Amino acid sequence: MSGKVTVKEMKHDGLVDAVASTASFFERHRLPLIVAAAAVVTAAVVFAAFSYRSSSRKESAARALSEAENREALEAVCRDFPETPSAPLALIQAGALSFSEGDYSAAHGLYLLFLERYPEHNLADFAQMGAAASLEAEGRWNEAIEAYNRLIVQYPESVRVPEAVFSRGRCLREAGRLDESRMAFREVMANYQGSLYAALAADEFVALGYSE
């Protein structure tokens, strides 16, 4: 007897039935499958193109930021690449540059714009500090006090809190609120011992005593 399996016997083999069934399925659904495959390929191409474009945009923004030499160039990065990580960095650098140039009003506005656009950014506390310092530099003592208070309340873990408390004390002194100023300097000395601002606060506290 031959060891070969006849075609008739093969028809009862489960594997053959499965293959036949699959072949029949592809025959019936050939066009929809081709369309579906084309859709998958198209989606993959679009995703790849988007990823490349996104990466290219980030690179262009980073290059523009590194080459920016003035406030106008920094503001252009924010305007032209708003969706990239370079945009908030350019905006806060524009604020810092304006401050260093003595344009405190512009600096204040740029810092506030940063806080409006990027409230959860890890440089938000820096922007709040910049906004408060800009007000102080303009001699707007009571507004600066409130701005420093805002930093202390909203960013209690910020490394800038000791400076904010000290600066608030300084503004309180300039505003003639001497008792509150002493309390602020005392707070710095008590809570931030060993820091630069504790030493500065001690000097200010002593100076207030002599001023009476």
Image: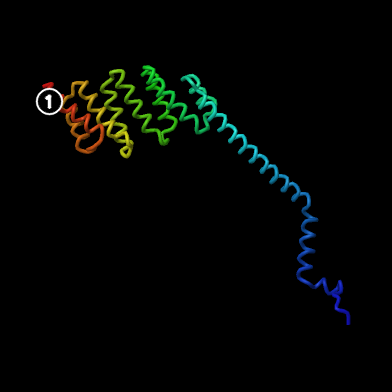
Counting from the top left corner in percent of width and height, residue 72 is at 49, 19
Based on the displayed image, in which of its 4 quarters is residue 185 positioned?
A: top left
In this view, which residue lies farthest toward the right? 1
Which residue is pictured at 42% across the width and 26% down the height?
113
Where residue 85 appears, as percent x and y from the top left, is: 50, 33
Q: Badge 1, how many Cα within 10 Å: few under 14, some, many 20+?
A: few
Q: Quadrant of the C terminus?
A: top left
Tally of numbered tags: 1
Residue 191 appears in which quarter of the rendering?
top left
Examine the rendered structure and indicate whether residue 3 appears above or below residue 44: below
Q: Secondary structure at mark 1?
A: helix
Q: To which residue does mark 1 refer?
A: 209
Q: Residue furthest bottom?
A: 1
Q: Quadrant of residue 91?
A: top left
Residues 173 and 9: in front is 173
Q: Nearer the viewer, residue 91 or 68?
A: 68
**Point 18% across, 24% down: residue:** 177
The image's colour scheme reads rainbow
Residue 205 relative to residue 54: left or right: left
133 vs 12, left or right, is left
* Image quadrant occupied by the N terminus: bottom right
The kind of residue tagged 1 is Gly
Name above or below for residue 150 compared with residue 8: above
Residue 80 position, x and y percent, is 54, 25
Residue 151 drawn at (x, y percent): 32, 32
